């Protein structure tokens, strides 16, 4: 194992980028967190992890995909998570945004007005807690919409009810195959036109866009066309180093950029950052100091780790996030709600250990080695 990297917590807010870590939930070890059962959450450990993220200067994106929305986190647990996480944000003085969806409705099919009502119910709850809303892509809307105009109408009606600007989340099919054809097309270029129309039709209602298509070209294309005041939050866990670095880090791999564009980098809202919060913080601190070479040296090696965590089938990436949380001592056991800790193989997890070690993502390499060795022995591997 490599020696632990020396990381310094920031002494003030991060300046050069806005960065949120999409946090996971820690299950109660003694709970019945088996497939199909309501989530039983270890609130002490779950909220302590959010405090850990805040201590590194990052914001928390909660009740998002990383928290197992639609994959083990039921509606009641989601509401409690949002309320508790917002309270911790107030205590810590940290920034928090939370997912707003339609998934509290059990019916598989909804009419478009019912989709609007479901969105609005969660939107109002998030606002009541004092959390910034992220309008997630809705499976109900994907089933009900028959045209691009249906998407525009639903988002227009939902955004009209928002009391403050929100973030729009465009989630690709790698994360959720049920979202095929979102914004009215399987072609990202056509879908992007609809997204931009949604923003234009509700001026002042959209604070940013989180794109999770795992396609850097599409993100840069949309980023350069966003109206003034609307941020691009990268959700690309494959290509975030270059997308966040932008023109300040030209050595980082990234698609061609328009040098005349006012948008030369993305901000961040990433599940990967939950797994590597100290590393992500150190990299952004380097940008704050005007040291792009240092940024690339710190964050560059983590991208291969993230690609392993988010490898196909990508929607099981949550297992890797929880695994790294366990290796780093943020939870007592490698368990997940819904029994999802069984979703990745030992060879897959072994590669995560190797890449986390190589990229400085292990906060206590000795603890990580001891826990991994014990897990191997439990599974019949002589370590």
Image: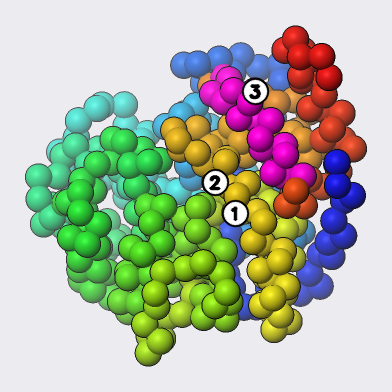
Which quadrant of the figure contains the N terminus? top right
Work out whether residue 42 or residue 300 is closer to the camera in this orientation and state it: 300
State the image quarter where residue 203 is shown: bottom left
Q: Which residues are magenta?
A: 339-357
Which residue ends up furthest to the top in the rendered image? 380
Q: Are marks 2 and 1 in contact (CB under 8 Å)?
A: yes
State the image quarter where residue 364 is shown: top right
**Image vertical order of residue 117 relative to residue 335, above or below:** below
**Image vertical order of residue 375 relative to residue 293, above or below:** above
Measured Cα–Cα span from mark 2 to mark 1: 6 Å
Secondary element at image label 2: helix
Work out whether residue 331 or residue 346 is closer to the camera in this orientation and state it: 346
Secondary element at image label 1: helix
Residue 358 coordinates in the image, percent (x, y): 75, 48
Q: Is residue 246 visible?
A: yes
For mark 3, what is the residue?
A: 346
For mark 2, what is the residue?
A: 307
For mark 1, what is the residue?
A: 303
Q: Is residue 33 magenta?
A: no
Secondary element at image label 3: helix
Q: Is residue 156 visible?
A: no
Q: Is residue 340 magenta?
A: yes
């Amino acid at each position: 194992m490599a020696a632990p990297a020396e990381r310094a917590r920031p002494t003030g807010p991060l300046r050069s980028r806005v960065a949120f870590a999409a946090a996971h939930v820690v299950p109660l070890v003694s709970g019945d967190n088996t497939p199909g059962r309501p989530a039983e959450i270890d609130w002490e450990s779950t909220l302590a992890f959010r405090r850990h993220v805040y201590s590194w200067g990052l914001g928390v994106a909660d009740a998002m995909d990383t928290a197992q929305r639609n994959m083990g986190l039921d509606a009641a647990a989601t509401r409690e998570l949002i309320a508790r996480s917002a309270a911790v944000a107030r205590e810590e003085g940290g920034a928090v945004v939370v997912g707003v969806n339609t998934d509290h409705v059990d019916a598989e099919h909804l009419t478009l007005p019912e989709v609007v009502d479901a969105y609005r119910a969660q939107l109002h709850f998030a606002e009541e807690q004092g959390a910034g809303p992220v309008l997630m892509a809705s499976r109900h809307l994907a089933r009900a919409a028959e045209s691009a105009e249906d998407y525009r109408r639903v988002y227009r009606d939902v955004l009209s009810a928002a009391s403050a600007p929100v973030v729009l989340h465009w989630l690709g099919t790698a994360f959720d195959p049920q979202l095929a054809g979102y914004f009215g097309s399987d072609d990202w270029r056509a879908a992007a036109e609809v997204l931009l129309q949604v923003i234009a039709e509700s001026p002042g209602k959209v604070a940013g866009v989180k794109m999770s298509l795992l396609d850097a070209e599409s993100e840069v294309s949309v980023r350069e066309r966003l109206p003034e005041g609307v941020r691009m939050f990268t959700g690309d866990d494959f290509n975030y180093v270059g997308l966040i670095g932008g023109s300040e880090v030209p050595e980082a791999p990234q698609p061609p950029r328009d040098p005349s564009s006012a948008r030369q980098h993305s901000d961040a809202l990433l599940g990967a950052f939950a797994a590597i919060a100290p590393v992500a913080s150190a990299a952004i601190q380097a940008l704050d100091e005007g040291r792009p070479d240092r940024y690339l040296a710190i964050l560059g090696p983590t991208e291969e780790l993230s690609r392993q965590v988010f490898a196909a089938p990508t929607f099981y990436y949550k297992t890797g996030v929880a695994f790294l949380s366990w290796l780093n001592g943020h939870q007592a056991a490698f368990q997940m709600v819904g029994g999802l800790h069984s979703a990745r193989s030992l060879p897959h997890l072994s590669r995560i250990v190797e890449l986390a070690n190589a990229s400085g993502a292990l906060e206590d390499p000795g603890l990580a080695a001891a826990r991994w060795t014990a897990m191997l022995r439990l599974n019949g591997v002589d370590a």
